Amino acid sequence: MENFKNVELVAKANVYFDGNVTSRSFITSSNERKTLGVMLKGDYVFSTNEAEIMEILAGSAKVKIANETSFKEYKEGDSFNVPANSSFIINVETICDYCCSFLK
């Protein structure tokens, strides 16, 4: 398990899809913007402005990134990249703990 030290934490939660997806945003000591969150079982569509890396910390999900033809399964320890100005569909099969890193 990765620990983040000396971070600037945004106290207000990010809440999506009627509370089925929640996260907290923070800035690392090296000025990286990240979120840590939880997704409950369900299907969700997210749009991106910035490129991002989604790391699955626990649970599993199937993901289809825009312009791809099929879903790919990700589980604990896996990650996937989402291009800037794009979107992805995520089918959460079990409660999914995640870390999202925004790329510059």
Image (spheres, rainbow, N blue to C red):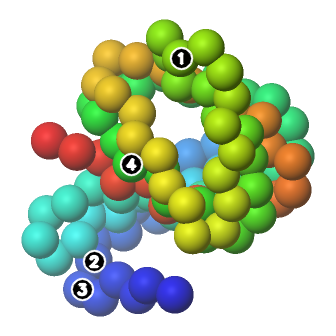
Q: Which amino acid type is shown beneath numbered disc 1?
A: Glu
How far apart marks 2 and 4 lie (CA) works out to: 19 Å
Where's residue 9, x and y in %?
A: 36, 69
Location of residue 48 with respect to 10 vertically, above or below: above
Instruction: Look at discs 3 and 1 and give the one toward the viewer.
Output: 1
- Residue of label 1: 68
Q: Residue at x 66, y 37 (%)?
A: 72
Element on which disc 2 rests: loop
Sequence order check, earlier mark of 4 and 1? 4
Q: Quadrant of the C terminus?
A: top left
In this figure, which residue is indicated by the disc labeled 2? Answer: 7
| Tag 2 and tag 3, C-beta contact below 8 Å | yes
Residue 22 is situated, as x and y percent measured from the top left of the image, at 66, 51
Estimate how packed mark 4 is, as few (under 14), some (14 to 19) or many (20 or more) residues with alpha carbons within 10 Å.
some
Is disc 3 in contact with disc 1, using a CB cutoff of under 8 Å? no
**In the image, is residue 86 above or below residue 3?**
above
The secondary element bearing badge 3 is classed as loop
Nearest to viewer (mark 4 / mark 1): 1
Q: Which residue is mark 4?
A: 53
Label 3 vs label 4: CA separation?
21 Å
Q: Does residue 31 appear to the left or right of 43 in the view shown?
A: left
2 sits left or right of 18 in the view: left
Residue under label 3: 6
Contact flag, marks 4 and 1 (Cβ < 8 Å): no
Mark closest to the chain's N terminus, 3 or 4 = 3
Q: Secondary structure at mark 4?
A: strand
Measure the C-alpha gap from mark 3 to mark 1: 38 Å
Q: Amino acid at mark 3?
A: Asn
Q: Earlier in the sequence, mark 2 or mark 1?
A: 2
Left or right: where does residue 56 sit relative to residue 50?
A: right
How far apart in space, not on screen, are marks 2 and 1 (Cα)?
A: 35 Å
